[in-house]
Image (tube, rainbow, N blue to C red):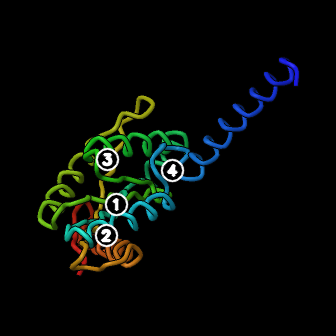
Amino acid sequence: MHFKEANAMRQALLQASVTLRKSQYNAHHDSLTGLPNRTLFHHSIVQNLALCDRNRQELCILFIDLDGFKAVNDALGHAAGDQLLREVSQRIAKACRASDICARLGGDEFAVALIHSDLEHSRMFANQLVERVSQPYLIGGNQAEVSASIGVSHFPSTATDVDTLLHKADHAMYRAKAAGKGRVCTAT
């Protein structure tokens, strides 16, 4: 093989590698916010639950839904709604520890897994997150306001598998909305 051919082959392999890595990233991250998506969140929680079970550690799932997002999106437009979602995701991610996992599940729904966190500390964190997310946003020169309703489930007392933990946290989040929004409810 000549030098030119070898160099061309090396460049093609490098480009294929870059394309593969980008494709893998895109398959597991939300394109709008850059947060892990539902698939990566689920996979990560399965792994962490196995570790928590083996080490007798706790884990809590927070299911977060924005209150008032549709009104902001309708009033200011989809571009403003997208910007709001990006800013909300940044506030959530900045509130989390490096060991925690935050994700955008879709629409205006987010989730956080608090690794090695008991229910009491998770509720306190969730209440702080409600306050953080509920601070006004400046979007395109307009002030936008949303709040968050959060449902919290706990491993191992609420459930021992990721699907049930998410389902129960989601159900608790709907109870928080029904109780007046901008609050936290714990799964039973």
Q: Earlier in the sequence, mark 4 or mark 3?
A: 4
Is there a contact, CB below 8 Å, between mark 2 and mark 1? yes
Q: CA distance from mark 3 to mark 1?
A: 10 Å
Instruction: Between label 4 and label 3, give the one nearer the viewer.
Output: 3
Q: Which residue is mark 3?
A: 92
Is 3 positioned to the left or the right of 136 in the image? Answer: right
Q: Nearer the viewer, residue 57 or 153?
A: 57
Give the vertical position of 140 relative to 83 (above or below): above
- Per the image, label 3 sits on a secondary structure element best described as helix
Give the vertical position of 140 relative to 28 (above or below): above
Image x and y of residue 52, in percent: 26, 67
Image x and y of residue 134, in percent: 26, 48
- The label shown at residue 173 is 2
Image x and y of residue 64, in percent: 34, 60
- Per the image, label 1 sits on a secondary structure element best described as strand
- The label shown at residue 64 is 1
Q: Which image quarter: residue 166?
A: bottom left
Q: Nearer the viewer, residue 104 or 67?
A: 104
Amino acid type of the residue that numbered disc 1 sits on in the rendered structure: Ile
Instruction: Between label 2 and label 3, give the one nearer the viewer.
Output: 3
Few, some or many C-alpha atoms within 10 Å of disc 3 (few <14, some 14-19, many ≥20)? many
Q: Which residue is mark 4?
A: 74
Q: Residue at x 37, y 45 (%)?
A: 88
Q: CA distance from mark 2 to mark 3?
A: 16 Å
Instruction: Between label 4 and label 2, give the one nearer the viewer.
Output: 2
Give the vertical position of 137 relative to 186 (above or below): above
